[in-house]
Amino acid sequence: MHEISIESDILASNEMCAQHNRQHFIEHGVYVLNLMSGPGAGKTTLLERTIDMMKDRFRIAVIEGDVQTHADADRIAAHGVPAVQINTGGACHLDARLIENVMPRFDLDALDLLIIENVGNLVCPAEFDLGEHDKVMLLSVTEGADKPLKYPVMFHVAKALLLTKVDLLPYVDFDVQSALRDARVLNLDLQVFQLSSRAQTGFEAWCEWLEGRIKRVKSLVRA
Ligand SMILES: Nc1nc2c(ncn2[C@@H]2O[C@H](COP(=O)(O)OP(=O)(O)OP(=O)(O)O)[C@@H](O)[C@H]2O)c(=O)[nH]1
Ligand SMILES: [Mg+2]
């Protein structure tokens, strides 16, 4: 009983901070995406390709969340966009306070799109609102088609599902129809994109969707 109330206090305090972050992002007209997946599903590689495709038209920055190392922020910075690394030092997810803490390191007025790569984990990140506008999750075909049933919360809260590494489909036992059906039972409106960062397929539709979301936030900014 005691443990339950501590957990709900943590989530309530996180929610307040997240609302504050979201308000702040809207005031500056920045669309914010929280990218989540299990470890190694291809988040950073997808970001590298997405940045290369969109950076001429949109001003992009990235927050990288990992337990340790600056490796992912270094990979992103090599593509010429600002990248800030957060090391959680053991925690399996980012939270709204961690995002608030690094916000002064960005000039939000000079951004259209801020992408937060969460810690690789299929469970904990789904519970913590960071103040993003949308949660988007990746599932790589190497992880198995049973993941929607085993990790339902993440599929339930995501606005879009990116099925990644589809270039490997001929080599793995992954039933796409079954995985997508299970995911849509959990989330009827889930937007699905099938991508390969290796073969560079599926990116036109994904970038078009992102562009629509960026414009939607811009339309809310007071004149
Ligand atoms: N075949 C194939 N491999 C890929 C693809 N995308 C990423 N990879 C490989 O998958 C591995 C993990 O990719 P990352 O982009 O680092 O994955 P991540 O989700 O950012 O990993 P964490 O941040 O550690 O959770 C790397 O060896 C990539 O080269 C893809 O589309 N096809
Ligand atoms: Mg990564």
Image: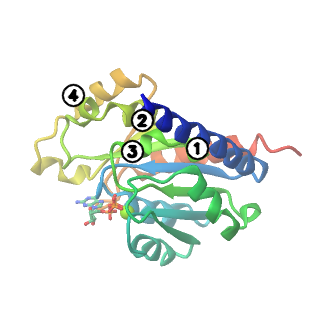
CA distance for labels 1 and 2: 17 Å
- Give the number of marks: 4
Residue under pointer 1: 14
Question: In what quadrant does ligand 2 lie?
Answer: bottom left
Image side of residue 185 versus residue 32, left or right: left
Quarter location, residue 126 = top left
Residue under pointer 3: 124
In the image, residue 190 sits, relative to residue 63, either above or below, namely above
CA distance for labels 1 and 4: 35 Å
Name the image colouring: rainbow
Picture disc at residue 155: none
Q: Nearer the viewer, mark 1 or mark 2?
A: 2
Q: For label 3, count other residues whose C-alpha is less than 10 Å away and answer few (under 14), some (14-19) or many (20+).
A: some
Residue under pointer 2: 3
In the image, residue 178 sits, relative to residue 42, either above or below, namely above
Picture disc at residue 178: 4
Image side of residue 57 versus residue 38, left or right: right
Q: Nearer the viewer, residue 27 or 89?
A: 89
The kind of residue tagged 2 is Glu
Q: For label 2, count other residues whose C-alpha is less than 10 Å away and answer few (under 14), some (14-19) or many (20+).
A: few
Of helix, strand and loop, which one carries label 2?
helix
The answer to the question of whether label 3 and label 4 lie on touching residues, with beta carbons closer than 8 A, is no
Of helix, strand and loop, which one carries label 1?
helix
Q: Mark 3 or mark 2: name the one nearer the start of the chain.
A: 2
Q: Mark 3 or mark 1: name the one nearer the start of the chain.
A: 1
Of helix, strand and loop, which one carries label 3?
helix
| Quadrant position of the N terminus in the picture | top left
Residue ID at (59%, 72%): 82
